[in-house]
Image: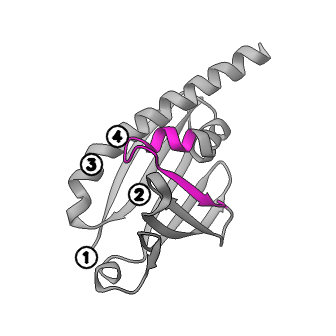
Amino acid sequence: MTKQLHFSTIVDAPRHIVWNTMLDPETYRAWTAEFTEGSYYEGTWDQGHEIRFLGPGGSGGMLSVIAENRPHEFVSIKHLGVIKDGVVDTDSPEVRAWAPAFENYTLSDAGGSTKVDVELDSAPEWDDFMSEKWPKALAKLKDLAEARSGQAKRSHG
């Protein structure tokens, strides 16, 4: 049984900068390090495409598909299973108890800034971890995007 968790932050940067900071491989690694140092992804954010979210060394993580992608506005990740020791599991009772699970990101204008809303399906055993880590991850994303936005303003100013 899963429940939906919600997290949000306001970033002092335009939506396209927040979006690119969130999804670019290098900055993705930086803000998701709040969950697991060395996290990264393999694949593409294109709608309908498979993407693997992996931890250090690539032997463990999650197998997912991009359910929807509206650039600079909304992306929905449909988690289908886990990867353990390089083996994909989408059929075990443990996985079927929660899969599929969605992780959705909505970016909206907020008076010259960008509001980032995250909604995700979470199993109860992950609630404490998610509640502790998501605010830290969003704070890191905010710092990275605001720094990138400041650089863009300086280079065009």
- Give the residue type that dot 4 points to: Pro
Residue 111 quadrant: top right
The x and y percentages for residue 113 are: 56, 31
For marks 2 and 3, the one nearer the N-term is 2
The tag on residue 135 is 4
In three-dimensional space, the C-alpha distance between marks 2 and 1, rounded to whole angstroms, equals 16 Å
Q: How far is disc 4 from disc 3 in space, using C-alphas? A: 7 Å
Q: Secondary structure at mark 3?
A: helix
Rendered position, 17 above or below 98: above
Query: Which residues are drawn in magenta?
Result: 27-45
* Residue type at the position of mark 2: Glu
Q: Position of residue 86 (x, y in %)?
A: 47, 70
Local crowd size for mark 2, using a 10 Å CA cut-off: few (<14), some (14–19), many (≥20): some
Residue 119's disc number: 2
Question: Is residue 38 covered in magenta?
Answer: yes
Residue at left 39%, top 60%? 120
| Residue type, numbered disc 3 | Ser
* Local SS, label 1: loop
Question: Disc 4 or 2, which lies upstream in sequence?
Answer: 2
Task: Identify the residue shown where x is 46% and y is 48%.
Answer: 117
Q: Earlier in the sequence, mark 2 or mark 1?
A: 1
- Secondary structure under the numbered disc 4 in the rendered image: helix
The circle on residue 131 is 3
Label number found at residue 1: 1
